[in-house]
Amino acid sequence: MVKEMLSVGDIAAMFGVEAKTVSMWRLRYAEFPEPDVLVGGMAGWDPDRAQELRVWESRRPGQGRRALLAEHVQEVLRRTFVFQFMRPADFAWAPIDFPGIVYDDGVLADGMEAKAAQHLIDVLRDQGYEIVFQDPATDAVEAVRRVLWDRWTADEVGEREFIGRLFDDHGRIYHGCTAFDAADYTLRRLAALGGELRPRQS
């Protein structure tokens, strides 16, 4: 029985990159795991070495810088939630508050979820950050509104992930959540929608 090997394309899929990126890694990094077979110029790796490949990728040069950037982005989002979306002087579960937000008998008025999503996007943009999506046709405001107010499923965000609504109809964050949690869940949900928060391209 012939054993199927992992191709460059398979490895690319493992790490969410293009095949040409894996080919570049092979050329650039001498420590990249050598293939087990070469057939007609095509490299193949034994599937049993998948963990070895994952370990290499986790230690790839530049990963530390990427991790620091991710932490910085999360901190920017956390501070935005605290100081320009929620009420830092009140209890954490006080309703969100920013110029233009309207409540009707304690409930967010019509259109306020979208307005809040737009406000968050604008504040982040003013700080030099943008929310971008793999699909350029994605409506960023609707996506952010969905991230903040919709209930999700395990299929959408993964097992053992928070699936509740981050904010309720009264503009209050899910009980027990902090601004740090809000930032973390927001980034995870954006990723599930093919989006990310990143420094704006100059």
Image (cartoon, grey):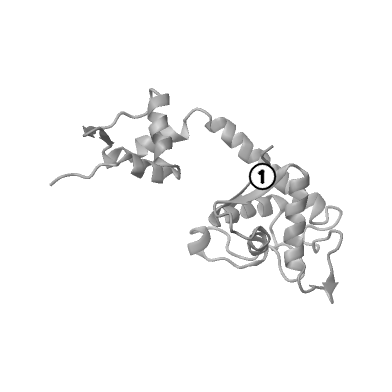
Task: Write down the residue under mark 1.
Answer: 74
Q: Residue lying furthest left in this view?
A: 1
Q: Is residue 64 above or below residue 115?
A: above
For mark 1, does the 10 Å Cα neighbourhood hold few (<14), some (14 to 19), or many (20 or more) residues?
many
* Among the 4 quarters of the image, the one containing residue 152: bottom right
Is 25 situated above or below 161? Answer: above
Viewer-closest of 197 and 137 = 137
Q: Which three-letter amino acid code belongs to the residue tagged 1?
A: Gln
Which quadrant of the figure contains the C terminus? top right
Question: Residue 32 at x, y = what percent?
Answer: 37, 28
Q: Position of residue 154 (x, y in %)?
A: 50, 63
Q: Is residue 106 above or below residue 82?
A: below
Q: Nearer the viewer, residue 62 or 139?
A: 139
Per the image, label 1 sits on a secondary structure element best described as helix
Number of marks = 1
Asked if residue 109 lies left or right of residue 26, the reply is right
Looking at the image, residue 118 sits to the left or right of residue 147; the answer is: right
Q: Quadrant of residue 44?
A: top left
Task: In this rendered view, identify the residue nearer to me: 52 or 134.
Answer: 134
Q: Residue, x 65% and y 50% (percent of image)?
A: 131
**Residue drawn 79% across and 56% down?**
85
Instruction: Name the residue: 49% across, 58% down.
Output: 158
Q: Give how far across and how far down residue 95 sits, in percent.
A: 80, 64
